[in-house]
Image (cartoon, grey):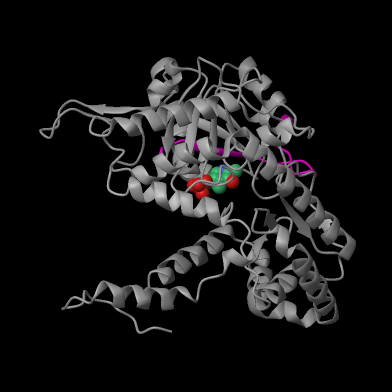
Amino acid sequence: MMENKVSLPKSSTSRDQVFAQLQKIHEVDTRWQDGRVFSLVYPMSDEHTEFLKKVYTLYFHENGLNPGAFPSLKKFESEVVSIAANLLGGGESAAGAMTSGGSESIMMAVKTYRDQARAVKHITAPEAIIPITAHPAFDKALHYFGVKLVRVPVDQNQRADLNAVKAAINPNTIFILGSAPQYPHGVMDPIADLAKLAKEHGIGMHVDACVGGFMLPFLKMLGQDIPPFDFRVDGVTSMSADLHKYGFTAKGASVVLYKDKDLRRFQFFVSKDWPGGLFASPSVTGTRPAGSIAAAWATLQAIGEEGYLKLYRELFATTQKFKTGVESIGFKVVGNPIGTLFAYQAPSDANIHVVADLMEKKGWFVDRQMNPDSIHLTITPAHPPIVDKYLADLKASYEHAKAHPELGGEGMAAMYGMVAKIPDPTMVNQFLFQYMDQRYET
Ligand SMILES: *Cc1c(COP(=O)(O)O)cnc(C)c1O
């Protein structure tokens, strides 16, 4: 490893030298280019990556904070929002904004519902109903904005439990959440039923399509059986969809969408009192990288419906190959995933966390999950070339794990085993806080 650099160097170093150092340090990172990572990186092709870099570089120094100075960014952002709204059945009346990512889109939706409920219904102790499989960005946003989290369980197929949602609705409920699909298992919540409930109670219904928003519309066009999940469903009042995942653009790009402008109004923040001038901001961030806004627009233009259809035809086929492959080894796919991401559980004669440890030794970056213990796969264009290699390594890892149950006491498997046995959840939180402190040690 490199020596630690903990204080600002006294002298300058040539940029060439620093860049050479950086390239060397970068060697410790997992090779996503070789399909070794499954959820953090969404590469489309070398040609597309070079295109993204070119666009991003062109807008490298501009700032999305004030489109007054950069009218082209206003055009890009409003067009990206319209394109997303049209893809997701929002039509003419839908409205939205670009954000830096799924978490920020979700934060803005939470703030919007909170402020709307406060202004219109005078709700001062707001609550939101969130299935346990929803992305933790909801827990986080509700925590940040002082909205009570009401968790509801899922059924055996990992879909939000409708009766539990129904029972949890009360006069303080501001919105219900459904995911299309949820991240852990790629399973779709019963969106139409949830939206119907929301409508009956006059409350909001947010569909989190962060991972599915730029995938499901194309799978549907390809003839896959995708249940209605977007603004075409009566009762859906807002959605989030990430461009920097399955939209295949540069990181820092997502959209939050609302049924209409009146609802979006509650998202904005304005201040007239600052000596620095009148201030109006759509979302959490102030300064916004223009590169990610321009890259999102350019990506949608370059790929177009034709390109996404071609891409998803291949990704869906690759996903099927992975599913059949893991099942033929003896693993079980969790629930009924509908898109290009899913999770699998180990057969009863092996510990999935031992399998994960062994896969990591073989150079795969493994996304582990709990409840149920499983491994997650998000399929991207980096993966068609490595399906067979992955499955061969998985088979070998499974055979080894089966023959060596004692490995459950080592590595990450031991940690997951321990965490699963801790009766007091606050202790797990303490452990996670410690982990965060360690993350900042040099
Ligand atoms: C990724 C994801 C998010 C959070 O998005 P970020 O861009 O990582 O902030 C929220 N919901 C779902 C379903 C996701 O897959």
Pick whichever, 282 or 128, lies toward us: 282
Residue at the (67%, 50%) spot, across then down: 184
Task: Tell me which segment is drawn in magenta.
Answer: 143-163
User: In the displayed structure, would residue 319 be above or below residue 109?
Assistant: below
Identify the residue shown where x is 21% and y is 74%.
Answer: 8
Q: Is residue 167 above or below residue 336?
A: above
Among the 4 quarters of the image, the one containing residue 386:
bottom right
Q: Nearer the viewer, residue 391 or 204?
A: 391
Horizontal arrangement in the rendering, residue 302 relative to residue 69 (left or right)? right
Rendered residue at 43%/35% (across/down): 98
Q: Is residue 145 left or right of residue 318?
A: left
Image quadrant where one finds the C terminus: bottom left
Give the number of callouts. 0
Residue 162: say if magenta. yes
Residue 135 seen in render: no
Residue 310, picture quadrant: top right
